[in-house]
């Protein structure tokens, strides 16, 4: 917790209404301003109490406050540093430790996720039982999507027209296992727009979950490995279609700041969100009409952490026949926030309910989001509201359908 | 067991779980509002959800003789919500329901924790808005606005909070829930309550006036080489009989800060910018706009931009509205001052501020609601340099002296709070202050509601203030009797 970064906060409170936990509970210590105050207390010598750790844990890390802050406070850096301190200094309850160990041993590893297919198919039926064992297990069961058929992607997808770029594709852990069709669609869209798409089969987790949970050493290990893999691929840019992964990859240089050689290599890696990349590249492929109304959901790690708001909307609006609708309170997190809905299931459910209500009010045929966590969270929240299965898609899938003239998604 | 501990036990019993905070680490996060150089950790914090709960807390405070302070979003700039270490901080941030929107009668009923902007957002689709617009409008609560009689850029034309509140349900300092209305015959108690800075009670339900959104809004940004030329343009605009919705001015340093924070892209090389907003019927705005543009050019504006869309209008305002917090980008610490001068005295007062900057070696950025002479000098300092905070404080005080000397006031809209209580005697005589104390005593005879604010010296109602020291001339003449 860098005291200089803490000092940047002038206590104006502009962050309060944008903070999901302040929106829920209306308490100063569960607002960014209050949390920065707590960080300041700790830096001045107050020991990290259970109460303090609880308020830091309750932060979703959605970064809406970073967008709102007129003084440019780097809350993103502050909360990352703080989470690392919490990991080092705070002794968690045994059940919390067990759940965290399970999550961090499972999610960053695709093969282990793959082994979860069968249990996942059963888990929704077992949800009430799992909920009783531990609320986090209940949340996991509730969120689990229908395990899709695996999709095998080739190591190279060639451009379908004159080549304009050679890009790498990060397939992601949760995206790759639970939403493989999104990666397939991403590769097709990029190829149709004139990109050679390199998909290194040996790539692993980008480290987003570890980084956003204060597991610094683990995050650095994943970061170094990811950098090395994409350096070998020899690409102009690494395209990422999961908001959480993209935001952590853009932070690599800061994550590896203590290792100057790696930090320089991190800076050389051009990471781009899919929508951001496509807008920079400019469209060449023809768009076929898609008569559908879409509610576009801003993933926090896209909108707040990467500032990518206009690009996905621009891409969607350019599709003939498509009607784009906004969701109320679009800047407020849906409660997914990486591992948040697993570790803080109660708060996450409240935020999910709030989001589901506004998504349904938009009255669109299809919900589009650019983050697998948000997609699962909102779908689960809509199910919980008794509204059945909402149709969800990634921006890439909608573009893919339009480019290939599939008529309707 | 202390009185506060006994009270805390009873508060815990009277309120829902999680509504009473006693953990010292949590309490400290409430130690200040938007003005951070006054700090006091509250004895206990309560987060009530209903008027009845607020009344219960206030009644219990009375029974135990413990002082209480109300707080909304904690954005105040005069330390009005500074807690008492020996008291209860009553936070209204969980009372944020919009209870009723009544478009035919142009009013809305809201709880005190609702933010100022949330009211406008709730009625915007229907062509209405809530007019007072403090720069912190997306955060500050309407309860706090009532306590401080908050203004904003558009108060030049539309007036302050007091002009837009129709009635309020308040909890009096003895714990009674009463309704004050602007329509009540007799004394304007609602008028007395608005702006009383939490010393006369706590608003728990507020009925506000909704205003029809104007047919046309035109915003222009005029850049001048210096602040004097800008000031002349302001006076000329008002003299021409134009009443803009807002006229705001920023000097070079404030522009630099806003640029660093929100990249507002104000014209390069501007020593001052004026933001002038005109609103109303189409024909009227068009006519006035031509006049304003001509006056700006005549007074040396080297660039004039007109917002062509809602986005461009928002971009112009963004620089101005973020200016206070944005100063954090160019200075480690700063004091936001708030004073008023007659418009015509503006150039002289600004020259005086320049002299102070030289004398003390302290930078001052200037942002003003120029139309009504409300200055917001931002006194910049580095709190890690020994002595600089004290010099900044001195400059800040001397600026208020300048305002008073030129026939102005020590506060335009931020309130007196704890920060300016000591400056009150520069504006008022002992007798004036005693008279105000009498009003306070009528509401709060025991002095438990936000004590230590507004008035320089605490005085109990038992200590007979000056005005009652001798017999009243009317009593002496046998024309009235004292009871």
Image (cartoon, rainbow, N blue to C red):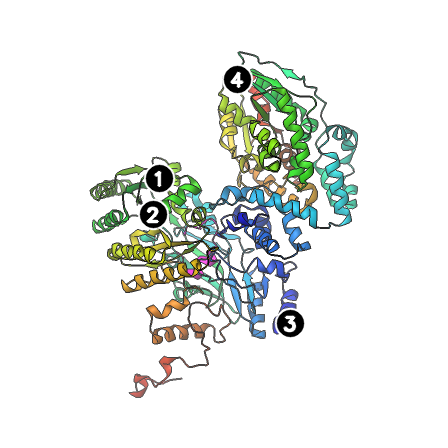
Left or right? Give the position of B370 relative to A32: left
The mark found on residue B250 in the picture is: 2
The residue range painted magenta reads B134-150
- Disc 2 on helix, strand or loop? strand
The mark found on residue B6 in the picture is: 3
Q: Indicate whether residue A187 is drawn in magenta.
A: no
Read off the residue under disc 4: A288
Closer-to-camera residue (A288/A248):
A248
Closer-to-camera residue (A255/A403):
A255
The location of residue A263, given as percent across then percent down, is 59, 33
Closer-to-camera residue (B357/B117):
B357
On whether disc 2 and disc 3 are found on a single subunit, the reply is yes
Q: CA distance from mark 2 to mark 1?
A: 11 Å
Left or right? Give the position of B385 relative to B372: right
**Viewer-nearest of discs 2 and 3:** 2
Of labels 2 and 1, earlier in sequence is 2
Q: What is the chain identity of the residue bearing mark 4?
A: A
Q: CA distance from mark 2 to mark 3?
A: 52 Å
Q: Indicate whether residue B145 is drawn in magenta.
A: yes
The location of residue B461, given as percent across then percent down, is 45, 78
Residue A405 in view in this figure: no
**Viewer-nearest of discs 4 and 2:** 2
**Viewer-nearest of discs 4 and 3:** 3
Read off the residue under disc 1: B266
Label 2–label 1 contact, CB within 8 A: yes
The location of residue A250, given as percent across then percent down, is 57, 32
- Disc 1 on helix, strand or loop? loop
The location of residue B482, given as percent across then percent down, is 37, 84
């Amino acid at each position: 917790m860098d005291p200089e970064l803490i000092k940047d906060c002038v206590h104006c409170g502009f962050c309060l209404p944008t903070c999901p936990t302040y929106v829920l509970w209306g308490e100063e210590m569960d607002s960014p301003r209050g949390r920065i105050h707590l960080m300041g207390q700790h830096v001045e010598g107050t020991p990290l109490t259970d109460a303090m750790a609880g308020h830091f844990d309750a932060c979703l890390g959605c970064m809406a406050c970073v967008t709102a802050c007129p003084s440019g406070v780097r809350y993103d850096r502050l909360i990352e540093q703080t989470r690392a301190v919490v990991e080092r200094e705070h002794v968690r309850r045994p059940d919390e430790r067990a759940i965290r160990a399970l999550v961090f041993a499972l999610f960053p590893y695709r093969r282990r996720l793959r082994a979860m297919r069968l249990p996942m198919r059963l888990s929704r039926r077992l949800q009430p039982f799992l909920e009783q064992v531990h609320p986090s297990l209940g949340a996991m069961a509730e969120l689990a999507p229908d395990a899709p058929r695996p999709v095998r992607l080739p190591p190279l997808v060639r451009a379908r027209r004159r080549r304009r770029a050679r890009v790498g594709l990060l397939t992601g852990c949760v995206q790759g296992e639970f939403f493989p069709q999104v990666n397939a669609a991403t590769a097709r869209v990029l190829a149709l727009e004139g990109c050679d798409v390199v998909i290194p089969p040996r790539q692993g987790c980008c480290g987003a979950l570890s980084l956003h949970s204060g597991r610094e050493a683990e995050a650095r290990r994943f970061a170094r490995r990811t950098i090395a893999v994409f350096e070998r691929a020899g690409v102009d840019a690494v395209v990422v279609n999961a908001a959480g992964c993209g935001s952590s990859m853009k932070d690599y240089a800061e994550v590896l700041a203590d290792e100057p050689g790696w930090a320089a290599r991190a800076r050389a890696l051009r990471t781009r969100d899919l929508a951001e990349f496509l807008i920079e590249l400019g469209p060449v492929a023809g768009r076929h009409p898609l008569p559908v109304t879409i509610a576009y959901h801003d993933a926090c790690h896209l909108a707040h952490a990467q500032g990518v708001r206009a690009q996905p909307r621009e891409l969607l609006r350019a599709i003939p026949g498509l009607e784009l609708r906004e969701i109320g309170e679009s800047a407020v997190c849906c409660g997914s926030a990486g591992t948040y809905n697993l570790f803080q299931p109660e708060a996450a459910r409240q935020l999910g309910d709030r989001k589901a209500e506004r998504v349904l009010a938009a009255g669109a045929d299809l919900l589009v989001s650019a983050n697998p966590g948000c997609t699962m969270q909102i779908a689960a929240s809509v199910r919980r509201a008794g509204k059945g299965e909402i149709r969800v898609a990634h921006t890439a899938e909608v573009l893919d359908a339009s480019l290939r003239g599939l008529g309707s998604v | 067991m202390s009185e506060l501990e006994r009270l805390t036990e009873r508060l815990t019993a009277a309120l829902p779980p999680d509504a009473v905070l006693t953990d010292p680490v949590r309490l400290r996060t409430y130690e200040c509002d938007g003005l951070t150089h006054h700090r006091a950790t509250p004895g206990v914090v309560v987060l009530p959800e209903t008027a009845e709960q607020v009344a219960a807390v206030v009644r219990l405070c009375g029974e135990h003789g413990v002082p209480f302070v109300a707080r909304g979003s904690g954005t105040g700039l005069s330390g009005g919500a500074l807690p008492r270490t020996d008291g209860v901080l009553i936070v209204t941030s969980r009372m944020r329901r919009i209870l009723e929107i009544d478009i035919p009668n142009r009013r809305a009923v809201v709880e005190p924790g609702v933010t100022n902007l949330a009211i406008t957002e709730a009625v915007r689709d229907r062509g209405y808005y809530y007019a007072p617009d403090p720069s912190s409008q997306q955060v500050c609560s309407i309860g706090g606005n009532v306590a401080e009689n908050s203004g904003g850029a558009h108060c030049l034309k539309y007036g302050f909070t007091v002009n837009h509140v129709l009635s309020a349900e308040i909890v009096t300092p003895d714990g009674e829930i009463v309704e004050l209305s602007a329509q009540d015959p007799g004394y304007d108690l609602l008028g007395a309550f608005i702006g009383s800075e939490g010393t006369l009670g706590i608003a728990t339900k507020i009925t506000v006036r909704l205003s029809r959104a104007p047919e046309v809004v035109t915003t222009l940004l005029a850049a001048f080489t210096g602040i004097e030329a800008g000031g002349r343009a302001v006076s000329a605009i008002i003299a021409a009989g134009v009443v803009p919705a807002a006229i705001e001015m920023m000097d070079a340093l404030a522009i630099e800060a806003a640029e660093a924070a929100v990249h507002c892209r104000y014209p390069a090389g501007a020593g001052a910018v004026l933001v002038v907003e005109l609103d109303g019927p189409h024909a009227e705005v068009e006519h006035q706009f031509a006049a304003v543009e001509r006056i700006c050019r005549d007074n040396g504006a080297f660039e004039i931009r007109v917002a062509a869309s809602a986005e461009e209008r928002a971009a112009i305002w963004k620089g101005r509205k973020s200016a206070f917090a944005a100063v954090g980008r160019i200075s480690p610490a700063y004091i936001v001052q708030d004073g008023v001068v007659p418009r015509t005295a503006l150039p002289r007062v600004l020259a005086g501020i320049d002299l102070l900057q030289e004398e003390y070696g302290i930078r001052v950025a200037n942002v003003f609601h120029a139309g009504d002479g409300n200055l917001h000098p931002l006194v910049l300092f580095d709190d890690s340099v020994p002595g600089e905070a004290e010099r900044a404080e001195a400059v800040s005080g001397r600026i208020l002296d300048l305002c008073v000397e030129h026939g102005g006031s020590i506060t335009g809209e931020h309130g007196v709070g704890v920060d300016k209580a000591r400056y009150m005697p520069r504006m008022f005589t002992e007798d004036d202050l005693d008279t105000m104390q009498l009003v306070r005593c009528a509401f709060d005879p025991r002095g438990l509601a936000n004590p230590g604010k507004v008035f320089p010296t605490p005085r109990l109602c038992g200590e007979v203030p000056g005005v009652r020291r001798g017999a009243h001339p009317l009593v002496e003449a046998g024309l009235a009797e004292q009871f």
